[in-house]
Image (cartoon, helix red, strand yellow):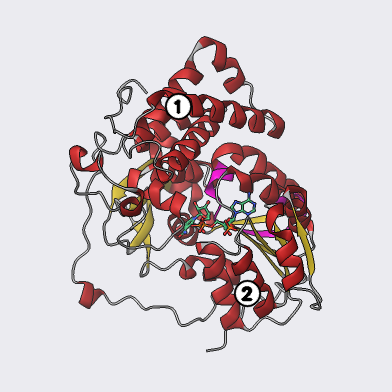
Amino acid sequence: MDMQTHPTHTSYTILGSTGSVGTATLDLLRHKGVEPGQIEALVAHSNVEALIAQAREFQPKSVVLADEAGYPLLKTALAGLDIEVSAGDSAVLEAAQRPSDWVMAAIVGVAGLLPVLTAAKRGATIALANKESLVCAGQNLMTAAKRAGATILPVDSEHSAIYQVLEPENASQVDHITLTASGGPFRQSSLAEMAQVTARQACDHPNWSMGAKISVDSATMMNKGLELIEAALLFHMPEQNIDVLVHPESIVHSMVTYTDGSSLAQLSPPDMRTPIAYALGWPMRIAWPAPRLDLATLQSLTFERHDPRRFPLLDMARAALRLGGGMPCVLNAANEVAVEAFLMGKIGFLDIARVVAEVIEHALAHDASSAVQSAHDIEDILMLDKKARRWAVSVVAALGTRVSHAPKHVEEV
Ligand SMILES: NC(=O)c1ccc[n+]([C@@H]2O[C@H](COP(=O)([O-])OP(=O)(O)OC[C@H]3O[C@@H](n4cnc5c(N)ncnc54)[C@H](OP(=O)(O)O)[C@@H]3O)[C@@H](O)[C@H]2O)c1
């Protein structure tokens, strides 16, 4: 099937091309039939084999590995092709600076912040999957985008849904928005069962196939917490006007309720290519062989409230958003460190919430709170991110055991 992207998009950059969102994006561009040289840059961290295969297939103008160790292999494998090859963090920023008009921001974690900011400052259309950059520096990113005339299109399925049904002419008549959440693989597990889960189980999401970090975030429901902060920034919505509803089938991807009592929702089968295709075609719609929704086969859609006792991180994120300043950055940094420690088997699943709670508590303490409150420009935010990571690393080290504990400070946060 022929696929048209928006006619003004003639060149593409994929930051995080080897990941789950990156490969889904390239799948859509494959359907579209991009020409050699139409992809300005493909950027990955260290998966050199996957990047070589992508470069050979798509013939981009440039490829970049953040991790310099893979550079010799990449360079040798692509010798003879008309593709620039580079490596290192500064090369990643140079790739974001290259003059493509559509950028997929799909690097995972706060590592994606400076590349997306670079693309925003040159006025690109940015399909934003990297939620951590918005959580940490949302105001800076939105301001930079506005100044440069950049367009930020949310790729998270929930925010894409809201973007699609939020009528600009009725923005002042929005009563509230509702983010839906699958509830993850442990929606029905007891705390005792959750204390024992492995990284493999946490990454085995019932509806979505995603990278390891966001899979664990989904399992703890921190993903919904990050999305809550993301929604507040993207849609200028006060925290108390953002509701979260667990919807295990992941068909209703979020909704907007207006003051006249109407709720508008976007529905589709859970496939990230649908919100990515929306961002590729925006402001038009494009055709691709998407799975079609069949409600008669599904028969029923269910909704429920989350259990704050088993999933405290969603409420911690809400608290961080209310506290404001650099607190969302602290929350995100602590979570990134804790999730990595969990994936490496250093701490248990329930310890992730414990690490985040203790780091937030530390950030609220007298000596740390001024750094949190004064984190406005990007340098301050990156410094705060580093500090919060150090605090989190010391909490992880102090836990010093693989045995999980129920989070200690959840109530207070
Ligand atoms: N997956 C989803 O369905 C989904 C849905 C909504 C939002 N998101 C968001 O999209 C982002 C990506 O998620 P994902 O699931 O696609 O993650 P993923 O599968 O882990 O992929 C991450 C990508 O980022 C690259 N990367 C990591 N660190 C980097 C660095 N320092 N510099 C340059 N590239 C780096 C990785 O390269 P290597 O492969 O070489 O490591 C990989 O290409 C996350 O922020 C996530 O929250 C994902």
Dot 1 lies on which element?
Answer: helix
**Category of crowding for the residue at label 2, using alpha-carbon neighbours closer than 10 angstroms: few (below 14), some (14–19), many (at least 20):** some
Q: Which mark is residue 1?
A: none
Mark 2 highlights which residue?
Answer: 53
Q: Amino acid at mark 2?
A: Ala
* Label 2 C-beta lies within 8 Å of the nearest ligand 1 atom: no
Image location (x, y in percent) of residue 58? 67, 77
Q: On the image, numbered disc 1 is attached to which residue? A: 397
- Residue 147: x percent and y percent? 75, 46
Pick out the residue farthest to the top.
366
Residue 126 counted in the magenta span = yes
- Residue placed most toward the observer, 273 or 172: 273
Q: Quadrant of residue 409?
A: top left
Q: Amino acid at mark 1?
A: Ala
* Mark nearer the N terminus (2 vs 1): 2
Q: Which residues are magenta?
A: 120-134
